[in-house]
Amino acid sequence: MTASSPMVLSLLLFASLTALLVLAPRTASPPLPLAVVVGDEEAPPAAAGGAAGISGGGAGVEEGPEDLALYRRVTLDAGEGAAVASKVAFMFLTNSDLTFAPLWERFFAGHADQFNVYVHADPAVRLRLPPTPSFRGRFVAAKPTRRGDPSLIAAARRLLVAALLDDPANAYFALLSQHCVPLHSFPRLYEALFPPKAAHHHRLPSYIEVLTGEPQMPARYVARGDDAMLPEVPFDRFRIGSQFFTLARRHAVLVVRERRLWRKFREPCLPESQDSCYPEEHYFPTLLDMADPAGCTRYTLTRVNWTDSFEGHPHTYSAPEVSPRLIAELRQSNSSTYEHMFARKFAPDCLGPLMAIADTVIFKD
């Protein structure tokens, strides 16, 4: 062997390693972290916080490294989802027991391949009722939430992240509360969301209320200070709407990827403006009206009765009010072009009366 043999061997080894690196198949994305969808049914998980995250707002608004890593995964991997995305993600935002889970189970029955469930349960509240089958193991890593606080926006974003990464077939993302109930059967909802004539699901609309000119809007706009929303959100682009929406996948991805407006809406309101601080009713309609006004229906599929609201809470239906007539009234909208699919707010004692008319009224379309 000549003196140059070691150099030749080294060059051959280097060339071989280079070829392996170039020709080897790309590795798949890492599996979904267990912190996103967790199976501990007795104690829903709390999301880890971190000083490295983006600050602002209360404790439930902090975004630690784990949150930011998941947001980046959505940016890289979620996209438009599966070639034929045709599932509905039901996202429950709750700070108490899921009392109406038995009614939802009857709603879901027979359609296991067309939906997924995700639950964000405030970790400060211990749920007493054990999860029913569709809710078991579907709790996402959660942080504390508070009404009239950006923590509700953060919780909705957390639910969207989990649903986007968990199943690429999720095409619609419906945000609901523990006080929501269905007003129609699952097939009726599915037909409304995926009409046969819609050939391309990726252009399906988002069902989100988008309003302007409401009397409370000037006070809410300056709740963080006179110019706090500028320059990103001038007053003429500020919108209001229900916090409960049904977003198409492309808009769910948009919400998770978006940072510019979120940095504004996550800031706390002034102490003297707490009565005008409801960021969860402004962030989503403002963002989507700016980004894709033509892609939004401008109405929500969730009916709420504000006729006798109290301290910012809508009317809460009690058991004696539940009847076939109430269901018929809640389904109706101000337009003949659509019907409401969900309704709130129902007290826990409504479960029995609702179950009694589920098959004969609610799910009989």
Image (cartoon, rainbow, N blue to C red):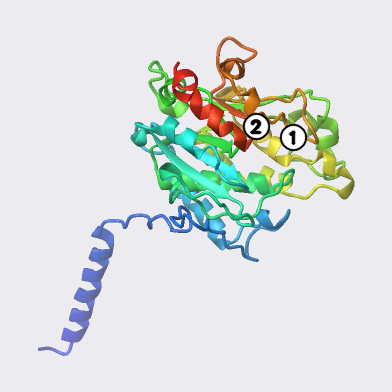
Between residue 143 and residue 75, name the one nearer to us: 143
Say whether residue 172 is visible: no
Q: Are marks 1 and 2 in contact (CB under 8 Å)?
A: yes
Which amino acid, mark 2?
A: Lys
Q: Residue at x 51, y 52 (%)?
A: 140
Between residue 189 and residue 171, name the one nearer to us: 189
Residue indicated by mark 1: 313
> In the rendered image, which quarter is residue 111 located in?
top left
> In the rendered image, which quarter is residue 80 located in?
top left
Residue indicated by mark 2: 345
**As displayed, is residue 200 above or below residue 63?**
above
Number of numbered markers: 2
Q: Position of residue 57 (x, y in %)?
A: 73, 53
Q: Residue at x 75, y 32 (%)?
A: 238
**What secondary structure is found at the residue carrying circle 2?**
loop
**As displayed, is residue 328 above or below residue 49?**
above
User: In what quadrant of the picture does the C terminus appear?
Assistant: top left
Q: Residue at x 38, y 58 (%)?
A: 30
With 200 as the anchor, is 62 left or right in this view? right
**As displayed, is residue 29 above or below residue 85?**
below
Q: Which mark is residue 212?
A: none
Which amino acid, mark 1?
A: His
